[in-house]
Image (cartoon, rainbow, N blue to C red):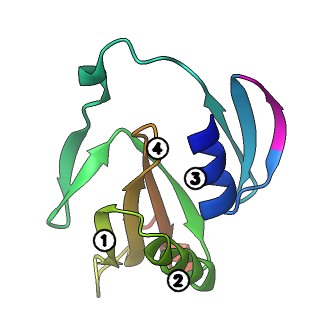
Amino acid sequence: MKEAREFYGKILGCPEGRSADDWVDFNLYGHQIVAHYKPSLDSSQNTLHQNPVDGQDVPVPHFGIVLTMDDWKALRNKLIDANIRFKIEPYIRFEGEVGEQATMFFLDPSGNALEFKAFQDLSQLFAK
């Protein structure tokens, strides 16, 4: 729980909501994410699977947050300054195509894959 509070609270800047000794609610850009303590029974269960997208091995499963481009750049810089190791370095995906977006992937301390993305044109969020 200490690692979750450090990562989500301090590094990502998510305000803490309700909590107990074994769980914490965080405000993740207006969305609730809850960290629960669960002792790992088998470290092999933390293996990530990957699917190829735009030449990158995207971690599966993952969940993502869509930010404004300014907020995305600020978070990218904060993560770099905090020496967060990226699974996929920040870059522009589908550049010049439908759905062009800034994206980055990294893991929280428990190995959960997170994607943060932004669009210059938000109408491209679900474009095909």
Q: What secondary structure is marked by label 4?
A: loop
Residue at position x 70%, y 27% in the image: 23
- Label 4: which residue? 109
Type of residue at label 4? Pro
Mark 4 / mark 1, whichever is N-terminal: 1
Type of residue at label 1? Glu
User: Closest to the observer: 70 or 89?
Assistant: 89
Label pair 3/4, CB-CB below 8 angstroms = yes
Which mark is nearer the camera, 4 or 1?
4
- Label 1: which residue? 89
Q: What secondary structure is marked by label 3?
A: helix
> Which residue is outermost to the top?
41
Relative to 97, is 38 above or below? above
Q: What secondary structure is marked by label 2?
A: helix
Type of residue at label 2? Lys
Label pair 1/3, CB-CB below 8 angstroms = no
Mark 1 / mark 3, whichever is N-terminal: 3
